[in-house]
Image: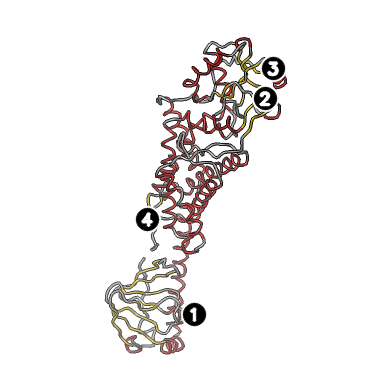
Amino acid sequence: MEDKRKPPSAEETGGLKLCELGQEVVISAGSRVVSQGETPEFFYVIQSGRLRVFRETADGIQTNLTELGAGAYFGEVALVTGQPRSASVEALTEARLIKVSQVEFDRLLDQNPKLARHIINQLATWLVTGDSRLEKEVVHQVKLRQISWFDYALMIGLSIALGLVFNIYNDNKIPLIYGWGEKDNIPEISLQQAREDYQKNQAIFVDARKSAFYDQKHIKGTFFNLPLILTDMMYPMFQFTLEQTPGAKDKTIIVYGGSFSRRFDVELARFLKNKGLEKVAVLKDYSGWENAFPLEEKPPKEAASISLGLAGLLEWLPLSIFVLILIPPIRRSPYLSAACRLLLGVIFIAFALSKILRPAVFALNTVDYGMMPAWGVNLWALALPWAELVVGLFLVLGIRTRAAATLIGAMEVTFIIGLVWAILHHLPINCGCVGEVGEPVNWLKVLKNTGALVMTIQIFLYDRFFVLDRGGFILRDRKI
């Protein structure tokens, strides 16, 4: 914005010309005439050339206030108020200036009321103009940083829509709600009846859980461990063992071990029914067997660790954010926000792509945590990977970054709760980040996710570098 102030006339200066009061100086392009914060000594009138007026913060962020050309003046505010310079002035081109000392300037004001009124009017005009510019900038910043429900509806709705549409055309598609539309003719057996059958040796107990769970704890004398994910491969051995067991045909096969979702035991029982076995039932109290039957137990064993590739290596970087957050200038840096956005975006995109193609595997990994009912597992397995992909892309591209950061933060809180739950209950599982593979569930994994959560907070508070404004993409660098 160009300043429209005019220098005082000869009439206003008592008939004196400014060149007679001060001295002429030549300023080369790029030279600073006055600096913000310095003690004022001179009042300047521009004869030729162009100069810019700007403010600068301690960490180097510059805010351009105006540009001045021939006939304009500056420096009167500090001389009138006696305060340090409120802004810096730098020559954009070679400029000729008249500088008037404070003694001469004060003498002029004392002897010429018209000049004093002229300067007061110009200061008032400048103040009003500055207030207007400040208001516009504040409104602009508020609009930029506003988060509306539309942002969340856009990302969540897009994730659900993509998940549902992709599932229709996916060769590995899964039903929206587990068991929906299927006739469940699997009888349930009470805990008391199962215990009586166990004591009378009238039942064959089959553990439906994954081998790691079975090895850690199972009913003593369990006939077989038949993990749901390996039933096709292990069933021939199960059938052979069953045929070789005396009296097995007259005994009820009781499937147990299912989690809160009943995902494993019911589906395994249905599988055995379809294979022609008639006397099959599931234990009604899915967790009561741990207190009702004698157990064979082993000390908790950490799940095997399998490399997560590039995404797994990038997961270590959030831990360094803890160190950077301790440095105030870096903590508030928009460039750190851009780095956090890129890092989190790449991690979430990489993890999402592996789960999108095989939602059934991710659903079973979700079941391992034992925190979700059956009706929600498949919906979670379909929507969450797409949500990770969408918010990851939004972060990388700078679209609705604050809303995307809050969604990722919510995901991280959910992941942390799940990890802590698994640790406290000694579940022998990995994180399930990339299909069947992943890192063991331990406190180090919790720390990694906490680092990612801190990154989302930094993005929420300080992100302003190449973001999608309501009016389009803008580049917010250190010169605002």
Q: Nearer the viewer, mark 4 or mark 3?
A: 3
Q: Nearer the viewer, mark 2 or mark 1?
A: 2
Q: Residue at x 55, y 46 (%)?
A: 446
Q: Which residue is mark 2?
A: 285
> In the picture shown, does residue 204 fall above or below 326?
above
* Earlier residue among tags 2 and 1: 1
| Amino acid, disc 2 | Asp
Asked if the residue under mark 1 is in contact with the one under mark 2, i.e. CB atoms within 8 Å, the reply is no
* Earlier residue among tags 4 and 1: 1
Q: Which residue is mark 4?
A: 475
> In the picture shown, does residue 358 fall above or below 186?
below
Q: Residue 354: which numbered mark, if any?
A: none
Asked if the residue under mark 1 is in contact with the one under mark 4, i.e. CB atoms within 8 Å, the reply is no
**SS at badge 2:** loop
| Amino acid, disc 4 | Leu
Asked if the residue under mark 3 is in contact with the one under mark 4, i.e. CB atoms within 8 Å, the reply is no
Query: Looking at the picture, how far across and down is residue 202, in whole percent?
Result: 67, 14
